Amino acid sequence: MGLTLALAKLDEAEIGAAHEICVANPDFWRRSGDFDPDDVPRSGVEQMLREPFEDPNREVVFARDESGRIVGFAELLLEHPRTGHPWIGLLVIDGRLRRQGHGRAFVAALEARFCGADLRLAALESNPDALAFWTALGYEEIYRAPDIEKGRPSIVMHKDLQSCKRDL
């Protein structure tokens, strides 16, 4: 499955697609507590997506399938201020497309982008589905700590991409 990644422009179409993707993931929002899973506000999704634009070290990328449809988005931290490692801060796939390989393909595209790095992320302890997903993709727990923004118990994971091969 081929996906293409593009930096967010945050036009109305992208914001609308991101809102639909968020609405289609009530279990994620129930576990994270970021949104009411029964009433995900469009304005809240837009604010969440716009926050990284204020920091040149953060990006929002959208994943599109072969037809151009947005199937997910991710927030990236290009270089952690303390460790220098890139982080996947958030990755959300359209809940209506679960178990079709989109998440795996999105992560593969992100890994190709960060080839040569030690890519990190934090999965909420309250989200066993996320933990199983990242573990199946070869990410390993390195420590547990509360997340910085809200203090939620989290599992910090990494995948060493030092030996991956970049496409020439």
Image: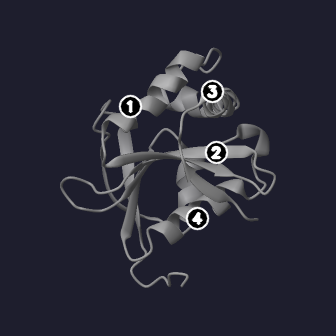
Q: Earlier in the sequence, mark 3 or mark 1?
A: 3
Mark pair 4, 1: CA separation: 23 Å
Describe the element under mark 2 as helix, strand or loop. strand
Q: Quadrant of residue 92?
A: top right
Q: Nearer the viewer, residue 13 or 72?
A: 13
Q: Which residue is mark 4?
A: 109
Q: Within 10 angstroms of label 4, few (less than 14), some, or many (20 or more) residues?
A: some
Mark pair 1, 2: CA separation: 18 Å
* Residue 34 is at least partly visible in this image: no
- Position in image of residue 48 (x %, y %): 46, 29
- Position in image of residue 63 (x %, y %): 64, 51
Q: Which residue is mark 3?
A: 12
Mark 1 vs mark 2: in front: 1
- Position in image of residue 114 (x %, y %): 44, 68
Q: Residue at x 66, y 62 (%)?
A: 105
As shown in the figure, which amino acid type bears the numbered disc 2?
A: Gly
Quadrant of the drawing holding the C terminus: bottom right
Q: Residue at x 38, y 44 (%)?
A: 154
Quadrant of the drawing holding the N terminus: bottom right
Q: Earlier in the sequence, mark 4 or mark 1?
A: 1
Q: Within 10 angstroms of label 1, few (less than 14), some, or many (20 or more) residues?
A: few
Describe the element under mark 1 as helix, strand or loop. helix
**In screen coordinates, is 106 left or right of 117?**
right
Q: Which residue is mark 1?
A: 51
Q: Earlier in the sequence, mark 1 or mark 2?
A: 1
Q: Which residue is mark 2?
A: 72
Describe the element under mark 4 as helix, strand or loop. helix
Q: Earlier in the sequence, mark 4 or mark 2?
A: 2
Q: Residue furthest left?
A: 82
Mark pair 3, 1: CA separation: 16 Å
Mark pair 3, 2: CA separation: 16 Å
Instruction: Tell me, yes or no, whether the two marked residues, 1 and 2, touch with CB atoms within 8 Å.
Output: no
